[in-house]
Amino acid sequence: MINLSYDEFYEFLKAALNNDLCELFRIHAIRDMFSLLSTTVDRLIEIFNYDILELNSLKQKLGYVSTNGNFYPRLGYRNSLDRLLLLVKTKMNLRMNSLVVPVNHIEYDIAQKLTELWENTPNLSNHNNAPILISWIKNIVENLKRPKNKFSYDHHIQQFALLLLILGSRNCYEFLRLNLYGALPHITNLELLKDSSDLIY
């Protein structure tokens, strides 16, 4: 239903509503279901508040005009339009929700796949010797869930970052840190680490 357009769309409207309401959509050049997502009943009937000669016949079929020139749709027609727009929006929301993979599932899947890959590597399955890449990616995923000022890094990442700073220079480190969002701690944090007694050489 969501993919209907042109003739199929208009045939659907004739069956779901009636010929006159279908004509209202033709007048507005609404040719597919996706266009209904951004419209309202008030926007559809607004055109009848103007004195357009070609629309007088349709205007009389769909509602009433007050003495001050305002158009009021027949209640049954308004309700039909409301139900149609609600149906389309509900269907689209269901469709979008079915396509969205929960973030927690993605995070779990990444961590699980990395661990499985490491465990299935011959002669290298000792967790104490796991490559920095695994804990680095896990750390990045965790940081993406936090505000920037709440980023945290485990001990191995801090040590790796400090070595990178020492061996690669300050400019090199800053270039990597700015381009690998959430992957490396700020230089001032590393300087504090460098001065602390926790550093293991």
Image: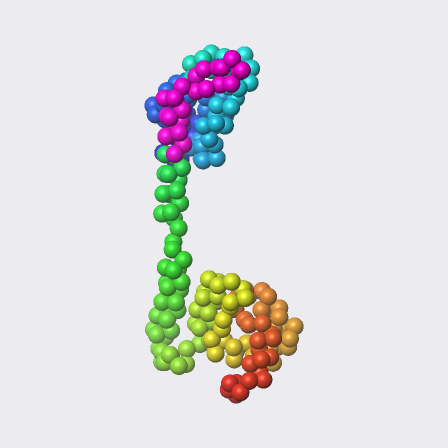
Residue 63: x %, y % from top left: 43, 17
Residue 118 sits in which quadrant? bottom left
> Going 47% across and 11% down the picture, which residue do you hit?
57
Task: Name the residue furthest front.
Answer: 67
Q: Is residue 19 above or below residue 123?
A: above
Residue range corresponding to the magenta coloring: 63-86
- For the image shown, how many numbered marks are present on the structure? 0
Residue 32 sits in which quadrant? top left
Residue 148 at least partly seen? yes
How has the structure been colored for display? rainbow
Residue 101: x %, y % from top left: 38, 53
Q: Is residue 145 magenta?
A: no
Report the front residue among 25 and 74.
74
- Quadrant location of the N terminus? top left
Task: Name the residue furthest right.
Answer: 171
Left or right of residue 148, residue 7 in this image? left
Q: Is residue 84 magenta?
A: yes
Q: Is residue 158 above or below residue 55?
A: below
Residue 27: x %, y % from top left: 49, 21
> Going 65% across and 72% down the picture, which residue do you hit?
171
Residue 137 at least partly seen? no
Q: Is residue 71 above or below residue 122?
A: above
> Going 34% across and 25% down the picture, which residue do you hit?
16
Residue 132: x %, y % from top left: 46, 75
> Going 54% across and 66% down the picture, which residue do you hit?
149
